[in-house]
Image (spheres, grey):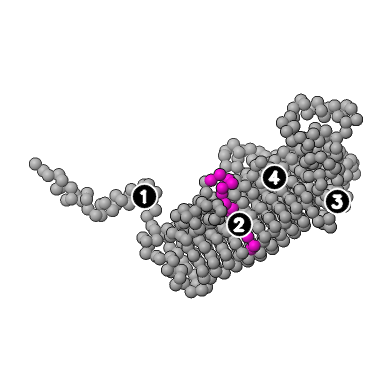
Amino acid sequence: MINTARQIPRAGWCSTASWGVLTIAYLLLYGVTLVSADDTGFDLAQTINQTPEGGVLNVPAGVYYGPIVLDRPIMLIGQPGAVLDGRGDGDVVQINAPDVTLRGFIIRNTGDILDRENSGIVVTAPRATIEDNRLEDVLFGVYLKSSPGSHVRRNHITSKDLDLPRRGDCIRLWASDNSVIEDNTITDGRDLVMWYSNNLIVRRNTVTRCRYGIHFMYAGQATVEDNRLTDNSVGMFLMYTKDLILRRNVMARNRGPSGFGLGIKDVDGADIRDNLMIDNRVGIHIDNSPSNVDLTHRFQGNILAYNDIGLGMLPNVTRNEFVGNGFIDNVQQVAVFGGGKFEGNSFTVEGRGNYWGDYRGFDMDGDGLGDVEHRVASVFENLMDRQPKLRLFLFSPAQQAIESAAKAFPVVQPKIRAIDTAPLMNPPRPPSIANAPPRSSAMATAGGLMLLAGVSVLFVGWRG
């Protein structure tokens, strides 16, 4: 009789090498990380302490557990596969020295305590450079806290899988003047927000499925350009801010409870031109801006298309100029929220007005301007301004009956919300429309393409 138990070792089944192969196969099958800081033999904390000021430290592939503290000006560069992991507690990386560069890492797994602002990267010193990192499962992403002169560029940031109010800001600036935020991709977070920070450049960022795509609070002297803000609650919200330039931004499909493409509240000093607001609940919403009686805001060359409301304003808003904009197929072109008079804003500037998709005038002399003024006025829309619940009856027989009665009996005159004495016969060119990212689902993608195609058709004549 053969003793099989004694034959197994001879066949190699219980050898150390065989068990090692089986263990590796099991770990690979179930996606377990094989390399860690201990496996590499690379002591990151010790090596950081040994790196001289101004030195460059290349970190090999591996998982390194936080918190990682940088308290001297060095350049920390992650090689492919280098991961900084917070183990679900506190911050992952803390930068406490000026002139630090952090590049090329996967940074993940912060704590989830909102009032402690657990962050993937928190910076408390000037002139940090945070670039080419991927932040995953982080409460707050990059937090510049009193870090003037910093650069945050080409990072991919997603928050934790939490309800929207419990997420942190993917990028937050606090008292960080003269900083540049550019080419970042942000999804499923809360805000990209600037607090008490001036002289900023915010450009070419893509923000999707967040609360506020870009949010200014008590900040100013900023240029905000070429950003794409889609499928958020609000595209861009500017509050208590001064001296802003907004140009060539795309704000599309922002449809939260307020659903502004662009919201402006208590802003003084704004030059807003060549932006695209498409398929939002409200394309542009203005509240008490400008508040300074010596200032006038200019909105020029913007496209407001396919929004529920193109331009929404509170009745106390004055000293805004609208020229060269395109109001295209919004359900309601201009809305005045609440009662009171609406005056002191101009829709014709230096003999030139805006393009209105519902204009029914003509251009006999061929100068590109309508010979008949355009009035934005509707009895039913006046009623909706005072009672938003009536929007339920849009396009219904009730709306048609009210509008027909107003035309049949001119004693019922609608309140005029805007008068354009020189309306444009051709719309302005759409800014950066080809760069607007599609929705994720196939149906939404098809709908988005049809929507963009519709806008493009409107401009075939202009392009020709």
Q: Is residue 173 covered in magenta?
A: yes
N-terminal of the pair, mark 1 or mark 2, is 1
Spatial CA span between label 4 and label 3:
25 Å
- Name the residue nearer the viewer: 68 or 202: 68
Q: Name the residue under label 3.
A: 349
Cβ atoms at labels 1 and 2 below 8 Å apart: no
Tag shown at residue 28: 1
Q: Distance between the residues labelled 1 and 4?
A: 47 Å
Where residue 108 sits: x, y (%)?
Answer: 48, 54
Mark 1 → mark 2, Cα distance in angstroms: 37 Å
Residue type for callout 3:
Val
As for residue 217 lying within the magenta part, the answer is: no
Crowd band around label 4 with a 10 angstrom C-alpha radius: few (<14), some (14–19), many (20+): many
Q: Where is residue 307 in the image (x, y as percent from the top left)?
A: 71, 40
Q: What stretch is highlighted in magenta?
A: 162-176
Residues marked 4 and 3 touching at CB (< 8 Å):
no
Provide the secondary structure element on which disc 3 rests.
loop
- What residue does disc 2 label? 172
Q: In which quarter of the image is residue 450?
A: top right
Check contact, mark 3 vs mark 2: CB within 8 A. no
Labels 1, 2: front one: 2
Q: Distance between the residues labelled 3 and 2?
A: 38 Å
Q: Residue at x 66, y 44 (%)?
A: 254
Q: Distance between the residues labelled 3 and 1?
A: 67 Å
Neighbour tally class for label 1: few under 14, some 14-19, many 20 plus, Cα within 10 Å? few
Disc 1 residue type? Leu
| Res. 260 mark | 4
Q: Earlier in the sequence, mark 1 or mark 4?
A: 1
Numbered marks: total: 4
Q: What residue type is labelled 2?
A: Arg
Q: Give the label, 2 or 4, closer to the camera.
A: 2
